[in-house]
Image (cartoon, grey):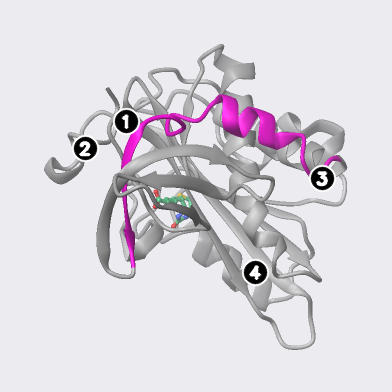
Amino acid sequence: MQYDELSEESLHKAFGTAAAGVTLRVLDCVDSTNNEAKRMALDGTPTPAVIVAAEQTAGRGRMGRSFFSPADTGVYFSFLFRSESPAAALSLTGKAAVAVMRAIRRLTGKQAMIKWVNDLYFNGKKICGILTEALTVPGEPTAIIVGIGINLVTEDFPKELEAKAGSLGSAPERAALVAAVFSELQAMQQDEHEWLDDYRAASCVLGRPISWVTAGEVKHGRAFEINERGELSVLSEEGQTETLRTGEISVFLE
Ligand code: BTN
């Protein structure tokens, strides 16, 4: 089902004056927009660059998983930046989650929740995943790729995803949504910490029972704080505190 126009023209229109100096690319179908961004980084494409696809044949998720990306029911896109500081990728991941949450709220009025580190949930199901990757190009600053997939009206998930994956249930224009996420993310460069308030407020993890893995051992406890670096402090059932920097947690939504 195609419900809007996704083209380089519609993307330019949605970006408006913000398109100045930004490389914009729209593809009907691609293996993965993150892969395309990597190819563009290696080709020396000027940055920032935005790559949007209506469909991915080999969409990738974190931990080597795939990301279900059927044609025209969601939006799949990557931002390519170059940075002198590879560490910038760490905070970009959390910032991107807040940028998506704000953009969705702006365009649809819906409030998605953030599951640390950077999954977005709506009505108890995952509607958005973010995959941040860094690539070193000889003689150039580090290329940082922020890949975002949002299920807008996707319905027929593969069996193994059915219990966990869902959709926003709204169909904002995809070009407008990508432009809104990009502008929210760019606005965050002005203030290194402002995003954290929304990151905490939209968290569906803080105060909840969770489980995580430390040194190969599954632990159970509660998440109680997100610190200034976006790290998650947890208290185990055994009474030990730990600070998780990245990785994956399971949350029990009561
Ligand atoms: C996850 O949920 O583990 C992360 C999923 C990230 C999916 C997006 S879709 C656009 C970009 N291209 C990819 O291949 N992956 C990201």
Q: Residue furthest front?
A: 239
The kind of residue on which mark 3 rests is Gln
Which residue corresponds to mark 4?
40
Measured as percent of width and height from the top left, residue 134 is found at 61, 69
Q: Which numbered disc, 4 or 2, marks the residue that appears first in the sequence?
A: 4
Q: Percent position (x, y) of residue 26? A: 59, 48
Residues under labels 3 and 2: Cα distance?
36 Å
Secondary structure beneath label 1: loop
Distance CA(mark 4)–CA(mark 1): 29 Å
Instruction: Label 3, secondary structure: give it.
Output: helix
- Badge 2 element: loop
x and y percentages locating residue 142 in the rendered image: 72, 73
Q: Is residue 128 above or below residue 240?
A: above
- Which residue occupies the extreme left position in the image? 159
CB under 8 Å between discs 1 and 2: yes
User: Is 84 in front, or is 218?
Assistant: 218
Q: Quadrant of residue 213?
A: bottom left
Residue 243: % across, % down = 51, 54
Which residue position holds label 3? 189
> Is residue 213 highlighted in magenta?
yes
Residue 16, magenta (yes or no):
no
- The residue at the point 81 percent across, 32 percent down is 16
Distance in Å between CA atoms under marks 3 and 4: 23 Å
Residue carrying label 1: 154
Do callouts 4 and 1 mark residues in contact (Cβ within 8 Å)?
no
Range of the magenta residues? 191-214
Between discs 3 and 2, the one toward the N terminus: 2
